[in-house]
Every structure is written in C-alpha cells, then in structure tokens.
Image (tube, grey):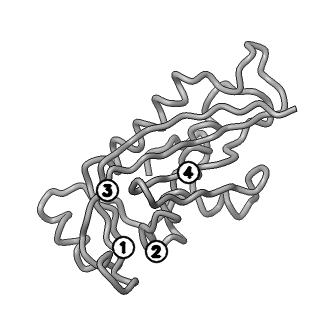
C-alpha cells in the first residue's frame, strides 16, 4: 500500500530559451502551476505522510522568494547580468545548488528543480518513514506541462546535484 499527498502552488515568472529556435528565444512570462506529490509506504505515528502546513509553507517560501514575479534565465544568458544590475529578481539555471546541471529554464528543467527543492524541504520535516517526492508536474500554460518522476529514493548523484542537505535548508 502506498499513501500519497499532493500540494499545488502557482507563480508568475518569465523565462527565455535562447538555445531553441522559435518564439521562446524572447523573454516571456507564464502563469505557472506546480504540483508536488509525496508518497510513503506507511503513515507516520500521527497518521500523515507529512504535515501539509509546514511542507507547503517551506515549499511555497522557496517559490515565492526565488521564482515568483522574477525571471528564470540560463547562467550564460546575456540578459541575466543586465536584469540583475537593474534590481530584477533572476533565478539562474546552470548554477548550484539546485540547477547546476540544468542550463536552461525549460518547463522540464523547472520540474526537476522543484523536485529537488521539494525533497530538501521534505527531508527537513517530520514525516512518515521513507516519505519521498515521487512526482512533480509543472504547467506553464493551459496546454503545456512537464512531469518529473524521480527514481525511488534519492541517489548519491541526485543529492550531489542538489548540493543541499536537510540541515542547509532550501535557500541556495
């Protein structure tokens, strides 16, 4: 038997994909939705997978602080330093800790980023034994979405890529 919980959050963020041909080379924004699923084989002593309130609060805090009403750009994008120099919020893909191996903010990469952040958040919560992030779906428009399903449990490689541990919190 597997128990699952899901949390959703929305955010308004621009991104640019200069490595792709077409209109997405332009800086443009979306009303993004993220849905994070956490699963556990058994419930905790308090009969939960994880307490919704604390998990949502920490996950939403990361999204609101780093992504909402900002821009997601590749670290090598020439617009990144320009926007930052003018006081704009910019989250850089291709930079540690969570996006080191994700050079551009595609919807697929955003799903991986949020899975990594959600797992670090989860690891810092009281939760059922073995609780893990099992799925992240990110929707960038009503017709475009990406889903990321991490391998069961976190491998050493995934921990190294995230560059974070529960003790470090979620602030990159």
Q: Residue at x 88, y 32 (%)?
A: 1
The residue identified by callout 4 is 137
Badge 1, how many Cα within 10 Å: few under 14, some, many 20+? many
Give whichever of discs 1 and 2 has the lower sequence position.
1
Q: Secondary structure at mark 2?
A: loop
- Is 113 positioned to the left or the right of 119 in the image? left
Classify residue 22 by image quadrant: bottom left
Q: CA distance from mark 1 to mark 3?
A: 20 Å
Between marks 4 and 1 in the image, the one whose residue lies nearer the viewer = 4
Q: In this picture, is 7 found above or below 16?
A: above
x%, y% of residue 118? 56, 44
Give whichever of discs 3 and 2 has the lower sequence position.
3
Between marks 2 and 4 in the image, the one whose residue lies nearer the viewer = 4
Q: CA distance from mark 1 to mark 2?
A: 7 Å
The residue identified by callout 1 is 75
Q: CA distance from mark 4 to mark 1?
A: 24 Å
User: CB atoms at circles 2 and 4 under 8 Å apart?
Assistant: no
The residue identified by callout 3 is 30
Q: In this picture, is 112 found above or below 46?
A: below
Badge 3, how many Cα within 10 Å: few under 14, some, many 20+? some
- Is 7 positioned to the left or the right of 13 in the image? right
Q: Nearer the viewer, residue 104 or 25?
A: 25
Q: CA distance from mark 2 to mark 4?
A: 19 Å
Numbered label attached to residue 103: 2
Give whichever of discs 3 and 4 has the lower sequence position.
3
Q: Residue at x 31, y 71 (%)?
A: 16
């Amino acid at each position: 038997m597997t128990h699952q919980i899901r949390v959703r959050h929305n955010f308004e963020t621009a991104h640019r994909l200069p490595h792709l041909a077409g209109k997405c080379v332009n800086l443009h924004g979306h009303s993004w939705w993220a849905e994070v699923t956490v699963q556990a084989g058994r419930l905790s002593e308090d009969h939960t997978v994880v307490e919704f309130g604390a998990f949502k609060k920490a996950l939403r805090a990361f999204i609101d602080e780093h992504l909402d009403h900002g821009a997601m750009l590749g670290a090598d994008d020439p617009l990144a330093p320009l926007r930052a120099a003018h006081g704009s919020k910019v989250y850089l893909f291709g930079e540690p800790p969570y996006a080191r191996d994700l050079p551009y903010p595609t919807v697929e990469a955003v799903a991986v980023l949020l899975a990594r952040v959600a797992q670090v958040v989860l690891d810092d919560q009281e939760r059922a034994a073995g609780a893990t992030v099992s799925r992240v779906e990110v929707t960038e428009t009503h017709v475009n979405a990406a889903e990321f399903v991490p391998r069961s449990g976190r491998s050493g490689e995934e921990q190294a890529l995230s560059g974070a541990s529960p003790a470090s919190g979620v602030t990159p």
